Image (spheres, grey):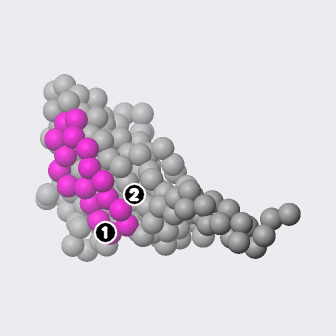
Amino acid sequence: MKTHKSIYLAMLALTLATPAFAGTTINVKLWDKGGKMDMSTGMGLGIGMHGDMTKAIMGIDIDKKKIKAGKVTFSVTNMSKETVHELIVSPINNADETLPYLNNENRVDEEHGSHLGEVSELNGGATGALTINLKPGMYALFCNIPNHYMDGMWTLLEVTK
């Protein structure tokens, strides 16, 4: 028969052996089709545009599309060999929302939108990370290098309770 002290010591050992919940990690791949891509004009493939995404020349892949609210780490890899990409995380109201866009600059207007953080300009092959707390809702993850967003470089993340 175990004593209270031995039960306590066993529970303490189990507690110390179990790491504290560190949140969720989402692996992010920023990609493009490489080579000499014509990026002189956006293809109109931003969120809510409902364009033909099979024609996208770049994009963002994430290994989890739906997660629980809390601490989230985005582990980002730029899969491109030569193109600079970035990752911005922004809350949105729904999957069809159109982000505020500056046509004359070919990018999302970060000043009028609300973004929660970013992994700035990663050279080809580089990695970076961003850790933030996310509440339940929808989030857009996108690259805001000129023309990249409209060329299909975005994805959606759903965060639940």
In this rendering, the answer to whether 82 lies above or below 67 is above
Q: Which residue is mark 2?
A: 73
- Give x and y (percent) for residue 127: 26, 44
Q: Secondary structure at mark 1?
A: loop
Q: Is residue 26 left or right of residue 34?
A: right
Q: Is residue 39 left or right of residue 6?
A: left
- Give x and y (percent) for residue 49: 40, 53
In this rendering, the answer to whether 48 lies above or below 111 is above
- Indicate yes or no whether the magenta region holds residue 11: no
Count the labels in the image.
Answer: 2
Q: Which mark is residue 43?
A: none
- Give x and y (percent) for residue 81: 20, 30
What residue do we see at 17% from left, 50% from top?
Answer: 121
Q: Which residue is mark 1?
A: 115
- The three-letter code of the residue at mark 1 reads His
- The three-letter code of the residue at mark 2 reads Thr
Sort mark 1 into few (<14), some (14-19) or many (20+) by Cα contacts within 10 Å.
Answer: some
**Where's the C terminus, which quadrant?**
bottom right
- Give x and y (percent) for residue 50: 44, 49
Mark nearer the N terminus (1 vs 2): 2
**Where's the N terminus, which quadrant?**
bottom right
Dominant secondary structure (helix, strand or loop) of the stretch shown in magenta: strand
Q: Which residues are magenta?
A: 116-132
